[in-house]
Image: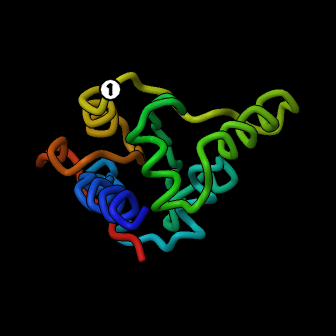
């Protein structure tokens, strides 16, 4: 049993970190977890400077999406999906923009003013900026 737990911890430790990334024109360079969670839950629709936030996410079944929501937002993917569905069906909001791959995520964030999303480090380049989280 102890070996299984150690092996599981080692696999989790080897997973690449998922970083919060934004369009380069975004003037915010740091967000706390509560604000980040509110943005991804589509409850906060603007950056602190008033610019509209355009949220991009991978499919809820994507392992990178699951790692981001669990580790950075401290929520499960299905909880976010329920919140989005509730807003869409009630007419009080909309779901985030869904992309198929991390490459598409990077390209859409780079070309969309106010965009926010997440990527593994290997997909980050100079076309986007990393947003720090506490």
For label 1, count other residues whose C-alpha is less than 10 Å away and answer few (under 14), some (14-19) or many (20+): some
Q: Please tell me in which quadrant of the rendered image residue 58 appears.
A: top left
Q: Quadrant of residue 29?
A: bottom left
**Which residue is located at x 81 percent, y 36 percent?**
86
Of residues 107 and 72, the one nearer the viewer is 72
Which part of the image, by quadrant, shows the N terminus? bottom left
Look at 38% across and 22% down and name the residue there: 100
Q: For mark 1, what is the residue?
A: 101
- Residue 11: % across, % down: 28, 53
- Above/below status of 22 relative to 33: above
Q: Residue at x 49, y 66 (%)?
A: 49
Q: Nearer the viewer, residue 69 or 113?
A: 69
Residue 50, compared with residue 69, is above or below; it is below
Q: Is residue 62 left or right of residue 130?
A: right
Q: Quadrant of the C terminus?
A: bottom left
Q: Position of residue 20 (x, y in %)?
A: 36, 56
Q: Residue furthest left?
A: 126
Q: Quadrant of residue 132?
A: bottom left
Residue 13 in the figure: left or right of residue 88: left
Q: How many marks are shown on the rendered structure?
A: 1
Which residue is most to the top? Answer: 100
Image point (58%, 54%), residue name: 39
Is 133 situated above or below 38? below
Specify whether 57 is left or right of 91.
left
Of the pair 78 and 125, the residue shown nearer to us: 78
Q: Position of residue 103 (x, y in %)?
A: 24, 29
């Amino acid at each position: 049993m102890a070996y299984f737990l150690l092996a599981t911890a080692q696999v989790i430790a080897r997973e690449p970190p998922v970083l919060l990334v934004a369009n380069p024109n975004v003037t915010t360079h740091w967000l706390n977890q509560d604000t980040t969670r509110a943005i991804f839950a589509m409850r906060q629709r603007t950056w602190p400077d008033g610019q509209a936030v355009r949220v991009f996410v991978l499919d809820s079944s994507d392992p990178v999406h699951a790692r981001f929501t669990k580790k950075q937002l401290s929520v499960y993917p299905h909880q976010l999906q329920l919140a989005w569905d509730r807003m869409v069906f009630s007419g009080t909001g909309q779901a985030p923009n869904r992309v198929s791959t991390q490459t598409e995520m990077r390209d859409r964030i780079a070309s969309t003013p106010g965009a926010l999303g997440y990527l593994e480090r290997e997909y980050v380049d100079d076309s986007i900026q990393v947003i720090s989280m506490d």
